[in-house]
Structures are given as structure tokens and as C-alpha cells.
């Protein structure tokens, strides 16, 4: 086991094909689809920043260059808005480019989440790191990543975020089970990717936040394609669990799968309801819909 070291880097895999969201994702990365007026991935980068992490590694791929542009400067538009005195819009425009300096790596062939993570081996190096999936939103008072860092620093073991799901949803997730060792914290002893309900060891599903020790890379290098012919991160995590132990953490907050049509609509309504410029009209509209 490595000596204690801090989580300083965040990895955001965003190279997936987004087939659940076709045709929108034919040319537009799903990670840029807006929740109200802000791309999903910008909320995720905000969570990273709010958790005290300064280095973000984006995994992008074919057709995903707009993600890199989104976090870059846009001088021509800035100059135009500045000369027109549109300071509110200018602030909005600069929000993303001021957030963070992102490093990006291309996954040339999207062979699965495990493969996307492996692409960052050299940039991450020999230290623990957090992964935030580019289409998984968590709305919480304390950022989910910060909650997980606290668990990692206390126990010094890799951690995956857990959420209880309905039986019918079990086959859509990685599922884990183990012994509860503290409030919200489980020491996992089983992990399986997208099991049938009969195979599933519990209803505790992995959602898109992980803190992993760097030994995961050696394991990923030897991990064969699993479910769906993809190199599965869960398969490598199960190996790491055997040698180092692995924790599951039931985070506090509400998670939205913005890469799924229904989850995307839910997230839009929930985030719009928190916006004073939109909430009153939206409430009225929903009341009207229900009444009719
Ligand atoms: P998903 O399984 O949700 O992504 O992966 P997908 O393959 O794009 O989705 P569908 O099922 O076809 O609609 C979760 C995250 O991992 C990234 C995705 O971009 C997403 O943010 N990912 C997935 C990669 O970066 N590379 C991959 O090879 C697969």
C-alpha cells in the first residue's frame, strides 16, 4: 500500500459515443448538451473546482473538440461583448475559461471506460486521482467529489460512489456489495458490471465518481474486454479490491444521468427550479400541465 498522498488531479472521461442520445449526439458531444443554459460538463468541472482540485484531465475523442474549445478563451466574442458594454454576458462567457486549465488527451478509439482511464496513465502518474464521468451530475450541498476525498483521506483506500437503485435498474450499472464499516461507508467484497438481477449481489450501484489509487493502471493494462466487448473499469476495480481493499460510499445528494434522455429532462427541470429567473414561470407551467 502506498504512503498517504493527496488527491490533486481529476479525470473526466468524455470520449464516449453517446448512442443513447442520438440523433443529438451525431455531431454534438453529449457532455455539452445544456442543463438550462450551461453544458453538463461545466457543472462537473465546477464540482472539481469546488472540491479544491486544480488539475483537470479531459479524455476526448473524435468529434469532441468543442469540449476543449468550451474551456478555452474566445477572444473575438469577448472583444465584441466588451465593446458593446454587455458585461453580464461577458462574465458568463468567461466563466468556463476562467475555471481551470484543462489538459486534454484523445482516446482514439472509444473502447470503454476502462480504456479511457488508461489513456491518462502518463499524465496522472503515481498518485491517487478522482474520476468524474462527463455525463453524471450530482447536485449536493457539499460537492460529491469533496465528500469522497474526505472518505479517501480517512481510510486511504480507493472509493466508488454508491446509490441504491430499483431492481429494474440493476442491470444498467456496476453493482457492489460488502460490509458497512461506518456511516455511509462500505468495505466492498464483490463487484460486477451490469449483472442480471439474479447475479447482482445487492442494489448498490456505482455512479460516476471514483477515487482510485494509481495501481489501477497496471491492472487496466492487463484487463481484457468484458461486458459489451468494452474494457470495463469495474473489472479492473474488482482486481484492485482483491489486493488493496475498496470502499463504497453512499454520497449525499441527487444524481442525474444527463447522458440518458429521461435523466437529462429531470436534470433540466430540477436545475431550472433552482433558478430565480425561471422557476416561477416553470412552476406555473407545470401546474397547468398537471391540471390539463
Ligand atoms: P457511457 O457508457 O455513459 O458513455 O460512459 P457512452 O458510451 O458515450 O454512452 P452510450 O451508452 O453510447 O449512450 C460514461 C462516460 O465515459 C465516457 C463517456 O463519454 C461518458 O462521459 N467514455 C465512455 C469514454 O470516455 N470512453 C469510452 O470508451 C466510453
Image: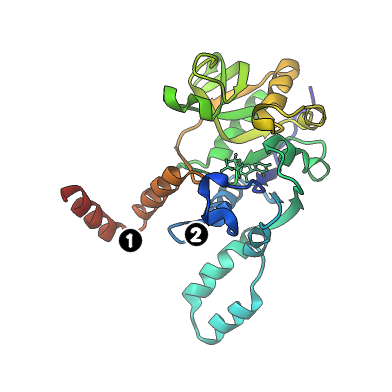
The residue drawn where x is 53% and y is 38% is 144
**Residue 278: mark:** 1
Separation of marks 2 and 1 at Cα, in angstroms: 14 Å
Q: Position of residue 235 (x, y in %)?
A: 69, 24
Does residue 110 appear to the left or right of 34 in the view shown?
A: right
Spot the residue most to the left: 291
Question: Dot 1, how many residues are within 10 Å of its Cα: few (below 14), some (14-19), or many (20+)?
Answer: few
Say how the picture is coloured. Answer: rainbow
The residue drawn where x is 69% and y is 31% is 229
**Residue 200: mark:** none
Question: Quadrant location of ligand 1?
Answer: top right
Q: Position of residue 146 (x, y in %)?
A: 57, 39
Q: Does the image show residue 17? A: yes
Q: Position of residue 203 (x, y in %)?
A: 48, 20
The residue drawn where x is 59% and y is 46% is 134
Kindly identify which residue carries mark 2. 38
Question: Dot 2, how many residues are within 10 Å of its Cα: few (below 14), some (14-19), or many (20+)?
Answer: few
Quarter of the image for the N terminus: give it.
top right
The residue drawn where x is 68% and y is 44% is 10
Whether label 2 touches label 1, CB < 8 Å:
no
Asked which secondary structure carries label 1, the reply is loop
Does residue 279 appear to the left or right of 208 in the view shown?
A: left
Q: Does the image show residue 56? A: no
- Asked if disc 2 is less than 8 Å from ligand 1, the answer is no
Residue 138 drawn above or below residue 46: above
Residue nearest the observer in this picture, 53 or 19: 19
Asked which secondary structure carries label 2, the reply is strand
Amino acid at each position: 500500500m502506498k504512503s498517504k498522498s493527496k488527491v490533486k488531479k481529476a479525470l473526466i472521461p468524455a470520449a464516449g459515443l453517446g448512442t443513447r442520445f442520438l440523433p443529438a449526439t451525431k455531431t454534438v458531444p453529449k457532455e455539452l448538451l445544456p442543463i438550462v443554459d450551461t453544458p453538463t460538463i461545466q457543472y462537473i468541472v465546477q464540482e472539481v473546482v469546488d472540491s479544491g482540485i486544480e488539475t483537470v484531465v479531459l479524455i476526448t475523442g473524435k468529434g469532441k473538440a468543442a469540449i476543449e474549445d468550451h474551456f478555452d478563451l474566445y477572444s473575438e466574442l469577448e472583444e465584441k461583448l466588451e465593446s458593446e458594454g454587455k458585461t453580464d454576458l461577458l462574465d458568463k462567457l468567461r466563466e468556463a475559461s476562467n475555471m481551470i486549465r484543462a489538459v486534454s488527451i484523445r482516446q482514439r478509439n472509444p473502447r470503454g471506460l476502462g480504456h479511457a482511464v488508461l489513456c491518462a496513465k502518463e499524465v496522472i502518474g503515481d498518485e491517487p486521482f478522482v474520476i468524474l464521468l462527463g455525463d453524471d451530475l450530482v447536485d449536493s450541498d457539499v460537492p460529491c467529489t469533496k465528500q469522497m476525498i474526505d472518505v479517501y483521506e480517512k481510510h486511504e483506500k480507493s472509493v466508488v460512489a454508491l446509490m441504491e437503485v430499483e431492481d429494474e435498474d440493476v442491470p444498467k450499472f456496476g453493482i457492489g456489495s460488502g460490509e458497512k464499516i461506518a456511516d455511509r461507508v462500505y468495505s466492498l467484497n464483490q463487484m460486477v458490471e451490469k449483472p442480471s438481477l439474479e447475479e447482482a449481489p445487492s442494489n448498490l450501484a456505482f455512479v460516476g465518481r471514483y477515487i482510485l489509487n494509481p495501481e489501477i493502471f497496471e491492472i487496466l493494462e492487463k484487463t481484457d474486454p468484458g461486458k459489451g466487448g468494452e474494457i470495463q473499469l469495474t473489472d479492473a476495480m474488482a482486481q484492485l479490491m482483491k489486493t488493496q481493499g475498496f470502499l463504497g460510499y453512499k454520497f449525499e445528494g441527487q444524481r442525474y444521468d444527463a447522458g440518458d434522455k429521461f435523466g437529462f429532462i429531470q436534470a433540466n427541470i430540477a436545475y431550472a427550479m433552482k433558478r430565480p429567473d425561471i422557476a416561477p414561470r416553470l412552476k406555473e407551467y407545470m401546474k397547468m400541465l398537471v391540471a390539463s
